Amino acid sequence: MRHIFVPAFAAVLAALTATATPASADTTIKPMTFVNQDLVNRMDGSRLLLVSDATADGTAVMTTRGITRDAFLSEAWDAEGTWSHRKRTWTMTLRNRAADKCLQPADDTPARGEAVVVRTCDGSDLQKWSLRLETKGGNTHRWWIWRPVTNLQLAMSVGSVGPDSNQITLDYAYPTYDRMWLLGPDNSNWW
């Protein structure tokens, strides 16, 4: 029997988007936290984690497939954010559970080709991501583009591809599979 995974994040989104809100209002919900999550890439099903499980400031992030809890300790994340009805986007901060550090571009002025790293959480806009839901023909597929709030023209993308792992960089915010991500409970099926 095939199990369909519907993450809590998607269920919360469905409830939020079903609520009618006047176009002039920009109401946000109270901050919501999603604990012990995986961030899965649509291109190949790989999951976001820290290179070599390192926990220092500036550690780069990558994705890899076939993760087991014994192989990598840095694949679990906590996400916290708010939903904007007017913009129809989430603003999220993603904190790595092993490092207790937040995801951000490597530089203060994010640019195409730049690495994505973790640094000590400081609440700055550099550590905030704008999530845009991708749809096709009016249907949602639960996949999100993660764009740095400080440069919405860019998105987190699978960069250089290796046999088992992928470096994460910033690239233009096109709706391609290497730029789409699904947030869901750690070590769960995502299809």
Image (cartoon, rainbow, N blue to C red):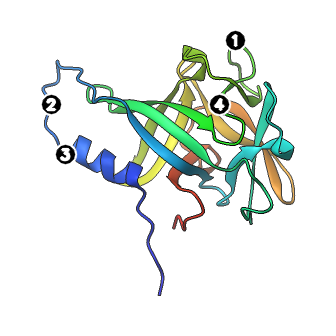
Identify the residue position indicated by label 3 in the image: 18
- Find the distance from the CA under tag 2 to the CA under tag 3: 9 Å
Judged from the image, the secondary structure of the residue bearing numbered disc 3 is loop
Name the residue type under label 2.
Thr
Name the residue type under label 1.
Asp
Q: Quadrant of residue 30?
A: top left
Point out the tag, 1 or 2, that comes first from the N-terminus. 2
Name the residue type under label 3.
Ala
- Find the distance from the CA under tag 4 to the CA under tag 3: 30 Å
Judged from the image, the secondary structure of the residue bearing numbered disc 4 is strand
Identify the residue position indicated by label 4 in the image: 103
**In the displayed structure, does residue 115 sit left or right of residue 95?**
right
Q: Nearer the viewer, residue 45 or 53?
A: 53
- Find the distance from the CA under tag 4 to the CA under tag 2: 31 Å
- Find the distance from the CA under tag 1 to the CA under tag 2: 35 Å
Q: Please tell me whether mark 4 or mark 3 is closer to you in this view.
A: 4
Name the residue type under label 4.
Leu
Q: Please tell me whether mark 4 or mark 1 is closer to you in this view.
A: 4
Q: Please tell me whether mark 4 or mark 2 is closer to you in this view.
A: 4
Q: Nearer the viewer, residue 46 or 70?
A: 70
Q: Residue at x 43, y 39 (%)?
A: 33
Identify the residue position indicated by label 1 in the image: 108
Q: Residue at x 25, y 41 (%)?
A: 16
- Find the distance from the CA under tag 3 to the CA under tag 1: 36 Å
Crowding around mark 2 (Cα neighbors within 10 Å: few <14, some 14 to 19, many 20+) is: few
- Say how many tags the image has: 4
Q: Residue at x 53, y 64 (%)?
A: 190
State the mark number for residue 153.
none
Identify the residue position indicated by label 2 in the image: 21
